[in-house]
Image: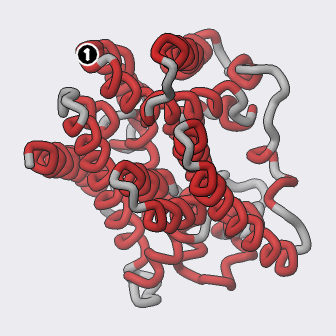
Amino acid sequence: MLARRRALQIGLLTLVLTGALCLVVLLNFPQSGALTFAHLGTRFSEGDPQGTVGYDGQFSYFIARDGAAAVPYIDGPALRYQRILYPLLSRVLALGQPDVVPWTLLLVNLVAHSVATGLLTYVLVSWRAPAYGGLVYGLWIGNLFALRLDLNEPLCFALALGAVIAYQQERFRWTIFLLMLSTLTKELGLVIAGGLALHAFVNGRRGWALLIVGAPLLMLLAWWGILRLWFGTLPTRYPAARFPLIPLEGMFRAHSPVELLFLALWLGIPAVVMILLALQQSWRYHRLTLGAALALAGAGFILYMPGVSWEDPVAAYRVGLPLIVGGLLFVGEIYPRRMPWLALLWLPALLLIPLLAQLWVGVSS
């Protein structure tokens, strides 16, 4: 009961805080309203080769607005349509009405992010860890940028964290189903699937381990086959699908020493530390806990995160979410008294919001 109550409280608090932040955006961009969250660029929306680029959320908007007819407005159709669930759900909720789509995109992300925060809080409190660890996730800068820019991560991780709870309760079919939906939202769902499968395999559930990671992967491959027939290419041809050979190689593509410092402080160094701690804990006690498995998967992904994600800090902080999830769950499970250290590490990233004030209040930073 306590875990449910704390999850509800932290989830609602996150909804209030992020809702207030979104209200600030709406008040500062009254002419475009919810469409401002899609951050359209004239290069794609108006077909102007010399126009502004905009950001990735515009492609979710075009797909949600136009469905299969959105191809002319999209830079890489195979990649963008790969992440189909978020725009598809928003289109369904809008009943196909274009003017409503910007609002459903925003609503889906607000609700999904608050639910994800509540679910993570539920797991933490069930392990007797402090509930505010969930708020660290709720206020992580990568999540806030995903909300601000109509991106796929909030829904992806709401579904993935639902899968974590289903796995805890040994509802493995629900685990697989939710992971399949998470992967259809964004391929980052496979990282969480990998962590759960690793835990299942090491703990003797090898058949379920194969299904937990194999079913979402096979579903994604089947969807790729459809995209290949449709567009004549696969998402693997785009830079977002190219992984480096050297760990953390992409981090050094940062455009300035300050960017590199923040990326190393909030993602690179914590990833290395989490891997070492998880391996040490597993070796010492001769068992792999659920939190350690998720930390190994999340931190391992950071080591080999595509270079194109590192080049854009906004992308790095949201694509790095598997580390935030795995790190919070690992520390909450094994070192709950050290949770303040994660809060002190990751919450200062909120300082990036004033540095990018133009996104939030429409003034130059």
Helix, strand or loop at disc 1?
helix
What residue is at 36 percent from the left and 43 percent from the top?
360
Q: Mark 1 points at which residue?
A: 340
Instruction: Count the numbered circles shown.
Output: 1
Tell me the quarter of the picture where residue 109 sits: bottom left
- Residue type at mark 1 is Pro
Residue 79: percent from the left, percent from the top? 73, 61
Q: Can residue 294 be seen in this view?
A: yes
Q: How crowded is mark 1: few (under 14 residues within 10 Å), some or many (20 or more)?
A: few
Q: Is residue 45 above or below residue 66?
A: above
Position of residue 318 measured from the top left corner of the image (x, y, whole percent): 51, 40
Which of 327/288 is in front?
Answer: 288
| Front residue of 80 and 226 | 226
In this rendering, would 92 be left or right of 124? right
- Tell me if residue 93 comes above or below residue 296 in the rendering: below
Q: Which residue is drawn at 21% across and 52% down?
A: 15
Percent of width and height locating residue 209: 60, 51
Residue 319 can be seen, yes or no: no
Q: Is 331 placed above or below 23 here?
A: above
Residue shown at 67%/84% (left/top)?
68
* Quadrant (top left/top right/bottom left/bottom right) for the C terminus: top left
Residue 18, given in percent of the width and then of the height, sits at 25, 47
**Rendering colour mode:** secondary structure
Which residue shows up at 25% across the image and 15% down it? 340
Query: In this rendering, would 276 be left or right of 310?
Result: left
Outermost residue, right side = 232
Q: Nearer the viewer, residue 141 or 3?
A: 3
Compared to residue 321, the image places residue 252 above or below, namely above
